[in-house]
Amino acid sequence: QEVNMRIVGVLCGKDLPPHLRQPYKKQYLQQYVQLTGFSCLSWKDVISGLNIIHQHMSRMFKDGVMHDWLASEFQEHVALDISSQYFTQKKSVNSSSSIPFNAQVDPKGILTKLIDDGWIHTADNTVGYYQTTETGNEKCIKANPAMFRIGDIVEADVGFIAIPQDGHYRMGLVLRELTLVNSS
């Protein structure tokens, strides 16, 4: 079972759909955001929470097997790199069925053409995109991922995974959902 955390921050970096050009290596293709809270006190609480999650996660491994978790930087402020790969190796999942890409993610079918016997697109590779609204009873509606801009205030639903790396593991932050909170 995955532990998830919702993080509100300012979008300071991104590589989001739609995917419009032919990629080089499908195993590295990802939907990516970088968030910062600049010097906001609540952002320091977010980072403290992530450090606690890392401590708990590292206890699932032999001492010294899990690398220390380090946040990234944006203009000398603490930032988070959060991503989700478009593809999963077929041999690493129980189900061998691939699901279709959302038309807003892959409007030209470029990613769909990359699905083969070795790599598939699963529900775990899917990111939900939303925006808040004040109309009607709905608080969030589905959004086109192309609408997100640097400087937007967003809420990211983040999962945590242990990623193998050189005989050790590191904590990865996986993007599950991205919601536009404020674009002004």
Image: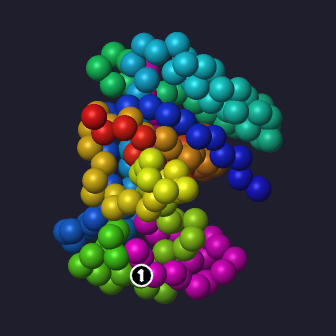
The structure residue drawn at horizontal position 51% and vertical position 81%, both measured from the top left corner, is 99
Is residue 56 in view from this perspective? yes
Q: Nearer the viewer, residue 86 or 24?
A: 86
The image shows residue 53 at horizontal and vertical percentages of: 70, 33
- Residue span colored magenta: 78-102
User: In this image, 114 relative to 100: left or right?
Assistant: left
Q: Amino acid at mark 1?
A: Ile
Kindly state the secondary structure of the residue where label 1 is placed: loop
Examine the rendering and report whether any part of residue 114 can be seen: no
Quadrant occupied by the N terminus:
bottom right
Identity of the residue drawn at 58% across and 65% down: 124
- Image location (x, y in percent) of residue 32: 39, 49
Question: In which quarter of the view is residue 86 placed?
Answer: bottom left
**Does the stretch in magenta take in 95?**
yes
In the rendered image, the vertical position of residue 53 relative to residue 126, given as above or below: above
Residue lying at 52% horizontally and 13% vertically, measured from the top left = 41
Which is more toward the observer, 77 or 42? 42
Q: Residue at x 49, y 56 (%)?
A: 136
In the displayed orientation, state which residue is furthest to the front: 136
Residue position marked by numbered label 1 in the rendering: 115
Residue 42 in the image: x percent, y percent?
Answer: 55, 19
Quadrant of the drawing holding the C terminus: top left
